Amino acid sequence: MRNLILTVSLLLIFFVILPFNFKIKFSYNFQENLGVFCFSFLKLKLKLFLFTFKKNTLIIKTKKHKKVIEFEVSQSQIKFIKQLSIQLKDKIKIKDLVAISHIGLGEAMESAILSGFINQLMCGLLAYVKNFKKSANMVIRSHTSFNKVKTEISAMCNFSISIFDILYSILMSFAITKRTDKY
């Protein structure tokens, strides 16, 4: 019985401490005001959301379109999210980061100029991330539609983090946000 308790406790400790792989896929079409967000963990697709923006609200629809969630973000929630991103920044290990763009304005010259500009913005953003995460593999794919009107930007990130780091960051962010809200 003692060996079983020891084995279970060691497995639980390893489950909390060892980093797990997560994958996030994001795509947004500016013309249709429609986005897709997919989150997977250990090769299992956990959630797929469709989202749109209306003024200051974010509307989220589930895959089966049965639920529609509308919410606005308050100032305290924005402070919490900023603090959480500060806490998680050094703990996340990015393995792959892919940025994809499909740009087209209907005219070849304008499409090429806009596509090049978007490509340079993505290069700058990925270079900024590469300065902090040295081991990350960065890929940019840029597609230009010379005779179609199309504007879509996608991103895929494969990263790992331990459950302990997530819980610690959430607790620290909550404590810091509550402390700053009092003053």
Image (cartoon, rainbow, N blue to C red):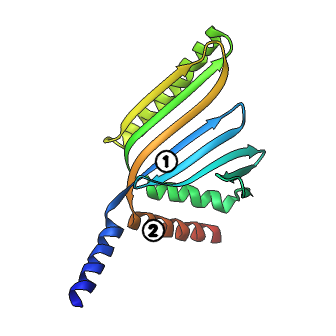
Q: Is label 1 in a helix, a strand or a loop?
A: strand
Q: Percent x, y for residue 22?
A: 42, 53
Residue 122 in percent (x, y) is at 50, 30
Q: From the viewer's perspective, is 16 left or right of 123?
A: left
Q: Quadrant where the C terminus lies?
A: bottom right
Residue at the farthest top position: 109
- The relative height of residue 46 versus residue 15 in the rendered view (above or below) is above
> What kind of residue is marked 2?
Leu
Q: Can residue 91 be seen at all in this image of the molecule?
A: no
Q: Where is residue 147 in the image (x, y as percent from the top left)?
A: 65, 12
Q: In the rendered view, would you say 128 is above or below 44?
A: above
Q: Residue furthest bottom?
A: 1
* Rendered image: mark on residue 167: 2
Query: On the image, numbered disc 1 is attached to which residue?
Result: 24
* Label 2 Cα crowd, 10 Å radius (few <14 / some 14-19 / many 20+): few
**Which residue: 40% across, 55% down?**
42
Residue at 44% x, 34% y: name it.
126
Q: How far apart are marks 2 and 1 (CA)?
A: 19 Å
* Depth check, front residue: 90 or 24: 24
**Numbered disc 2: secondary structure:** helix
Q: Badge 1: how crowded within 10 Å, few (<14), some, or many (20+)?
A: some
Location of the N terminus (image quadrant): bottom left
Q: Is residue 146 left or right of residue 97?
A: right
